[in-house]
Image (cartoon, rainbow, N blue to C red):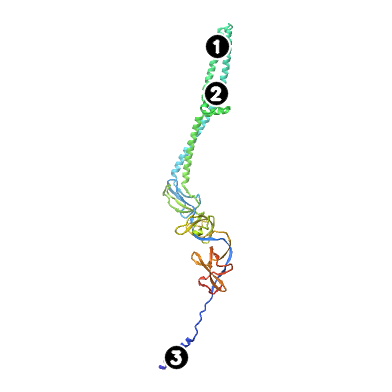
Amino acid sequence: MRNLFFFFLLIALFSLALFCCRKPEEKIEKAVEINTAVAGREMAAPVISAFGSIVYKAKADVYPTSISNVKALFVDKGMNVSKGDILALLDDVKLQVQLRQSESDVQSKKALVALAKAQFDEGCQNARKTILSIDRIQCAVDQKQKEYDNLKRIYNNKLKLHIIGGLSDEELQSIKMNMDSAGSALEQALLELRTARVGFSDKDIYGAGYEIPEDKKEYEDLLIQINTATLKAQLEAARAELEAAQSQMENIKLYLEETKIKSPIDGIVAERYVDIGEKADTETRLFTLFSTESVYVSVTVNAQRCNEISEGCTATVRLGSAVHNGVVEQVAPYADTKTGGRTLKIEVDNKDKSLIPGLFADVLITIGEKQLRLSVPKEAVLHKQDDYSDASLFLIRDGHAFLQNVTVDFITDSKVFLKEGLKDGDVVAVSRLGLLSDGCEVEVR
C-alpha cells in the first residue's frame, strides 16, 4: 500500500514538471474589418440644420351673426374643408316669415311708385296742355285787341263826323256800343289769360330761383318742371320707400344666407364646440379652423447662427420620407432669454395636406451660394449629440486607422461638409467606428 502511494506521487510530480516546461500561447490580434468612403468635393450651399414644429399659418374662429339654434352639422373635428363649404345650418323659421312679409311690403311699395309715376306723368301732360292753352288764349287776346283797336279808331272818326253834324246820335251810339262790347270781350280774354298763367309766368320762374331761358323749349320745360315739383317729390318719396323696403328684404336674405355657416378658409376643422339643438349667439364659437394650404415650420436657431439667416432664404423641410420646399418668412428680432435662440418661421406649401400642425420636422436652411465643398458621409464623423464643434473621424492609411480631428462647416441629411482636417481623396472609415482606436490595424471590406 505504501509503495502504491509513492507511485502516484511520482506520476503527479512528473505531470507538473511537464506542464511547467510548456511555452505560453501568444495572443493574436486580428485586423478590424470596416467599410470606407472617399472624401470628395461637390457643389453644395451652406445650410443650417435645425429641428422645428409645424404650426398653422392662418386660424379662423367661426361665430354666428345672429341668435338661433343649431339645426344641422356637416363637419366634425379633423375633417378637411374648402373655403365656402357649409359647416352647419342654423334655424331660419323666423327669418323665412320676415322674408315673406318683406317681399309683400316691396310689392306694395312698387305699386305706390307706379301710382306716383302715373300721377307725375299726368301732371306733366296737364302742364303741357296748360302751356298750349295759354298760347291759344294769347292768340284770342291778340285778335280781340285788334278788333277793339279797330272799333275805337272807327268810333273816334265817327265822333269827329258827329260833331260837325255829319252823323246822328243814334248812329254814333251804335258804334260806341260795338266798341264797348269789343272792349268787354278783350277784358274777358285778358282775365282768362291771367288765370291760365298762374304758375306759368316769368314771375313764377324767378320765384323758383331760375333765370328766364331764351330758348322756347327750355322755357316750356322749366315751366313744366316748376308745376310738377310736388308730384315729382311724391314720386321720389315713393321710390325711397321702395328702396328702403328692398334694402330690408336684402338684409333678411343676407341673414338667411348667414344661417348657412360657411368655412372662411381652406383648411382643417381643429375643433367643434356645439351640438345640434344648442342655442348659439354672436359670442358662441362654433368651430376653429386651421389653414392647411400652406403652413409654418417654427424653428429656434442659435442667435449667432441666426444672424446668417434672412427673410427669403430657402429651406428644405423633411417629415419622414417626404421633402417639402419652403421660404423663411419671419425672423424674430430678439432672442429668447431662456434658450438664447431666435425663432424664425418658414412658410411651406402644403397642398397635399401631409404637414399637420403639431408634428415635428427636420429643417435645412440654405444660407449661401453653391460652390465646390469637401464632404464625407455623415456616419464617418464622431461627435457629441447634436454638437459638431469637437468632431473627428478615422483616416485610413496603409491598412491602419488614424484618429483625425476635423472642423465642420455644415451638415445635411446624409453628409458632413468640412472646413479643415481633411483633403480631397482621403479615405475614411464609415462603419464599426466604436471598435477602432488610433493606429489600429484595419481590413477594408
Which residue does the image show at 49% across and 37% down from the upper left? 243
Give how far across and how far down residue 408 sits, in percent: 53, 64
Marks 3 and 1, how far apart in space?
203 Å
Q: Quadrant of residue 420?
A: bottom right
Q: Which residue is mark 3?
A: 10
Residue highlighted by disc 1: 176
Relative image position of residue 158 (x, y in whole percent) = 58, 10
Looking at the image, can residue 413 be seen? Answer: no
Q: Residue furthest top?
A: 165
**To which residue does mark 2 refer?**
134
Residue type, mark 1 in image:
Lys
Q: Nearer the viewer, residue 406 or 257?
A: 406
Which one is in front, 177 or 374? 374
Q: Amino acid at mark 2?
A: Ile
Per the image, label 1 sits on a secondary structure element best described as: helix
Camera-side mark, 3 or 1: 3
Which badge, 1 or 2, is on the more N-terminal residue? 2
Assign the N terminus to one quadrant of the image: bottom left
Category of crowding for the residue at label 3, using alpha-carbon neighbours closer than 10 angstroms: few (below 14), some (14–19), many (at least 20): few
